[in-house]
Image (spheres, rainbow, N blue to C red):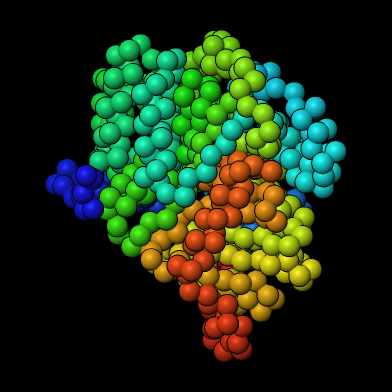
Amino acid sequence: MIPTKFKTLESKAYVKNGFLRLLFVSAAIIAEIAYVMYIMGEFSASHPWVSAVISLLAVVVALIIYGRHENASMKMVWMLLIIAAPPFGTFMYLLTGLTGTTHAMRRRFISVDNRLQPYLPDDTLTLSTMEEMDNGRAAQFRYIRNLSGFPVYSNSQIEFFADTLDILERMKEDLRSAKHFIFLEYYAIEDKTIFAEIHEILRERVRAGIDVRLFYDDIGSIFFIDQDFARKMEQDGIKCRIFNPMLPLANVFMNNRDHRKIMVIDGMTAYTGGFNLADEYFNITSPYGHWKDTGVRMEGEAARSMTYMFLETWNAMRGEKMEDPDFSPLFPDHPPLFSDCGFVQPYGDSPLTFEHVAENVYMNLLNGAKRYCWFTTPYLIITDEMVRSFLLAAGRGVDVRIITPGIPDKRMAYRVTRSSYHILARHGIRIFEYTPGFCHAKQCVCDDELAVCGTINLDYRSLYHHFEDGVLMYHCQAVHDIKTDFDNLLPQCREVTDQYTHHVSLPVRIWETLLRILAPLF
């Protein structure tokens, strides 16, 4: 029996150490920025022409931002900041606002992708079959295939899990049966109850000669594990790597995090969803009430795309030297085990490209919806373009609903989320808040035919700054299971639509406008 509460002195030390490290690195970066600002100020005071050059540079940067092919919300906040404080705004934009322009990192990913791409199958026949069924629905999948390279599969079984404890038991069964390799990539790992169970299985599999690799994001795990965690994993024979380690040095790439949650076993079975390998995701601890999360299990050829995503980031973080000289053993041939399972398309999104696949998939679903389109998201901090897609869908008579948490984990993000309610509610979108606690599930279901489940929040960080993954499904049993999950969720929510359709006072309107302007920075 797993305890409902789990607190130890060791875990408190992890949180303290993580906070101190975050505080030290943040202070160092702030000091670097302050020093640059001071030097620029001193130079401007002694050389008047420097101030004119900075102002001219600010104008040039603002024009470049205006001309970029980005959404208006992202451009507006930076242009306002640059106009209000030219030296500071320009420097901060060059440091953190240049989404997708880390040239050295992009070259690494392109190099890895070029080697991995041949291992993904040709899906021409599968797409042709879909087109014969419904060309409009096939277009959703074709977009992902054309713009991100991830194929659609018709020979894979996908299973949806509405409860994280259920998916945990299935994951452990699959891990114990691994024969060749195990890949784990998670935004956050907590070295406590849940991971201890998985860690023991991983150690046993290593002793059996299995290639086990563990990959986690430094920021996502900073309050959960200490800096010795990777070393301890290596001592157990588990290859461990940290994504984008947090260093006390201002750099362009620090804003991009690996928010993916991927588990791959033998290239035949794969998992993803909203949950990390930390106790709160499985309600072992409950800092925000009941934690609601979901995930999917894929078996068959679709696991190839999840293997691709893992190997992409694993090898790109290595630098110029790739760990895998030959990827062939990691992409085994899949016998045709499944048929009539519908269509499945795992896909990834990266801040190092200029195509915002994650956002566009959601907007495509809204634009193509005929009867209904329902979402769950922990944060609702969206662009004007996505707001317009929501409004257009509701204007066509589509039943559009959004479920957000009733108990926040980040209060400022919660306020920004609620600032979006008014415009949506006034145009017919129904807003619900999950009353038992924090709804962290990231999923969408549309017309009983299409569904998405994965790691992608409806917020700027997920849609523009993070490495993410999702699974698009069509005519699968999992689609109906996700719809059932929504049907079970809605009675546990309070509908807040009516209270956000009334007239809003001027101070509230000003406050909400300010929050929406600053939303891209959250």
The count of marks equals 0
Q: Which residue lies furthest to the front in this view?
A: 340
Answer with left or right where residue 276 lies relative to residue 393. left
- Residue 140 image offset from top left, x and y in percent: 75, 45
Check the picture and name the quadrant holding the N terminus: top left
- Residue 186 image offset from top left, x and y in percent: 43, 37
Q: In which quarter of the image is residue 343?
A: top right
Taking depth in this image into account, of 183 and 25 the one nearest to the observer is 183
- Residue 280 image offset from top left, x and y in percent: 33, 51
- Residue 489 image offset from top left, x and y in percent: 49, 62
Look at the picture and state if 200 lies above or below 257.
Answer: above
Residue in view at x 74 percent, y 58 percent: 369
Residue 339 visible in the snapshot = yes
Q: Which residue lies furthest to the left in this view?
A: 9
Residue 107 visible in the snapshot = no
Answer with left or right where residue 61 lies relative to residue 241. right
Look at the picture and state if 336 lies above or below 168.
Answer: above
Residue in view at x 25 percent, y 31 percent: 228
Residue in view at x 55 percent, y 29 percent: 299
Residue in view at x 70 percent, y 22 percent: 121
Taking depth in this image into account, of 369 and 112 the one nearest to the observer is 369
Q: In which quarter of the image is residue 86?
A: bottom right
Answer with left or right where residue 122 lies relative to residue 189. right
Taking depth in this image into account, of 178 and 477 the one nearest to the observer is 477
